[in-house]
Image (cartoon, grey):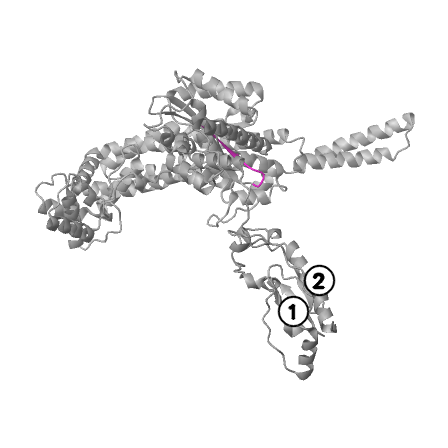
Amino acid sequence: MSDSQKKVGKKKDKKSYPESDSVKIDLENDSSMNMDVEDDEVHSVEVDDTNDSDDNKSGVKRQRKERSIVWQYFTKLKKKAVGGKVPSKCNKCNHIIIYDSKQGTGNISKHIKSCYGSSFKDVGQMILNSDMKLKSSTFSQSMFREMLVAAIVMHELPLSFVDYKGFRDLFKYLQPDVNIISRNTVKSDLLKMYKREKEKVKEMLMESPGRLCLTSDLWTSIATDGYLAITVHFMDKQWVLQKRVLSFSFMPPPHTGVALCEKVFSILVEWGIENKIFSMTLDNASSNDTFIGLLREQLNKKLPLVSRGNFFHLRCCAHILNLIVQDGLKQIDECIYKVRESIKYVKGSQQRKEKFIECVQLLSLKRKKGLRQDVVTRWNSTFLMLDGALFYRRAFCHLELSDSNYKHCPNALEWEKIGKMCSFLGVFYDITNVFSGSKYPTANLYYPHVFMAYLTLKEGMGSEDEYMRKMADLMMTKFQKYWSDFSLTLAIAVVLDPRYKLHFIEWSYSQVYGRDSKEYEYVDEVLHSTFHEYVELNMDGGSSTTSNVASTSEASKGVEDTVDDDSTSVFGVRARLKDFDQFQSKDFLANKKSELQLYLDESRVDRNSNLDVLTFWKANEFRYPTLARMARDFLTIPVSTVASESTFSASGRVLNEHRSSLGKDTVEALICTKDWLYGDYCSNEVNLDELTEDIMSLDISGESNASNSMNNSKVTTPNASSSVAKKQ
């Protein structure tokens, strides 16, 4: 055997290749290294090393195709080759390995197996093993059941989904050995998943460093069963606002304040959070006043609430704003009626829609603004209806001239009223959008909006138009009725915004009550008393003042320890040193400013800056530890019950007319588990635009062509007009 053959044989012994099973796969996360490996590429070609040296001596390099699989993972750096040793760089982690043709690629293969960047496989490696045979994949029945229940929860599928023959056949086709479970097994697995996720949420609430805020509302199902939804809002350790559905439980009648108190308190005890509650936001139902009074008294017995519960009850600002505006809209009921009837008339038939759009095009009006009929229960939809109708007022006037059947067009004076109303209510529309978001901003942003509403009403009361003054007077009466219920809580929240601080409260209260008012002094007093209460609650953790005093005491104790421990001679020395410590502490505390005073004395951040108030307090948490705890609680307060109400849209789909007999425990498990697992990923919010049809989205050309084609074919069906109307 020649020397070259021996070298080749030795090379074959040392050469090794990565097993396909040794490389993990993550096709979704890394598609940049997709490799299509052909069968003949698995084997490398051995070339006599003596040929390399001969080629190098002659100066002629023979081009060889690198057929080893390792070169799909590594790149040779031939320009840096020294003495036949070529540095090779890993394509994933950029690690450099010296490749020596005499030693083979064993060291490279070892690196590929342990490379932290190699989290991929190609499709061939997924389905084929090292013998190029199909792999026998391991099927987990427990994982299949887990994913099946999760899919039912996520997509709000009926529990009988597993009994559908089509899906059973599909599962059998994908995995012949699958054991299809029944709906009763699905229910059992669902309840197990609910209990497991409930423990996770309970642990999260226990680990929350701040207090918890609640929103609650009642809902009646299609089967007239009452349900109580409770949502908890809190700030996690990273200063990120979180919300979870705490409970969606059956609430039998009567829905009195006493019954609600017993139900809610039992839920809080079940979750073990009765000592962590800070506030509760409710709507304006009459029974809620009794309910909140009883619950406040019961919670104070367990552990006193902050400020004895002065901040515990907050009325839903979105509901209050709706009541205020609805009183104002009564002044133009006739105008609203005519606009609503006008839009109803245009929507009445396909021909009227086309005729109205022809009027719009004839007057060269741009179809950029929508035109929708309002939803009576949502005043902001009424505002959008009036605003849209005002934009197309000339088209409505033209339609009145060209269509004798159109009888409800507002006159010039009414159009003028509508224009002034839209200008006046624009501020309230913006505020409603802020209040009505379940992904709500922090509580500090609400007070400036509420105060802008007050200034708008004050300006309206001085209007030259009598109907505007009457409307503003009615709205102001309602505004002042509820102002005191939420002004104090929102005022303290805005003080904790470094862009406003106490200066904004001083300015706004001077606009409402005049300078040096008792109301402003009361806010300032409550602010400082609340801060001092947090200082007392935080004594164990230590505030800036108490920690400094403690350090002084420790220092004086160290001086005492240096004195000889003689009971007779030392007694007098210690007594004198203690007198000095007391003198120093009094002097220190007299001149030391509290965290609150230091924060208020600092210059304000520019109001127009794009400041995230939570990021600010996260950065200053160690500078103002006590004030940061106070900010964590107040900035968490939700000012509307929209978060709880949004749960009802999901419950309405779960308990529809076809599935109204689900068990109470099953309903709660479906609603809560979906929120805990998927949260905002599966949002239940319904866009206002989805509730009504936009007339201006009609495509005339498409409609006309469809209509002409049907007339030419002379085909008439009962649903022909409706099918044409749906083409847009």
The residue that mark 2 highlights is 13
Q: Tell me which segment is drawn in magenta.
A: 230-238
Circles 2 and 1, Cβ within 8 Å, touching? The answer is no
Residue at numbered disc 1:
46
Residue 609 location (% of width, % of height): 48, 50
Q: Which residue lies at the image location 59% right of the left edge and 29% below the top edge?
A: 533
Q: Does the magenta segment cover residue 483?
A: no
- Residue at mark 2 to residue at mark 1: CA–CA distance: 12 Å
Q: Does any portion of residue 694 appear in the rendered image?
A: yes
Q: Examine the structure image and report whether residue 236 is included in the region drawn in magenta.
A: yes
Reply above or below: 436 against 89.
above
The kind of secondary structure element at disc 2 is helix
Q: Quadrant of residue 405?
A: top left
**420, 641: nearer the viewer:** 641
Where residue 265 sits: x, y (%)?
50, 20
Residue at the (70%, 36%) spot, across then down: 547
Q: Quadrant of the N terminus?
A: bottom right
Q: Residue furthest bottom?
A: 58
Would you identify the image quadrant in which residue 101 lies? Answer: bottom right
Report the number of discs.
2
Of residues 534 and 480, the one drawn nearer to the viewer in this rendering: 534
Quadrant position of residue 47: bottom right
Which circle marks residue 369 in the picture?
Answer: none
Residue positioned 50% across, 35% down in the render: 146
Whole-percent x and y of residue 404?
A: 7, 42
Give the residue type at disc 2.
Asp
In primary-sequence order, the first of circles 2 and 1 is 2
Q: Is residue 330 above or below residue 717?
A: above
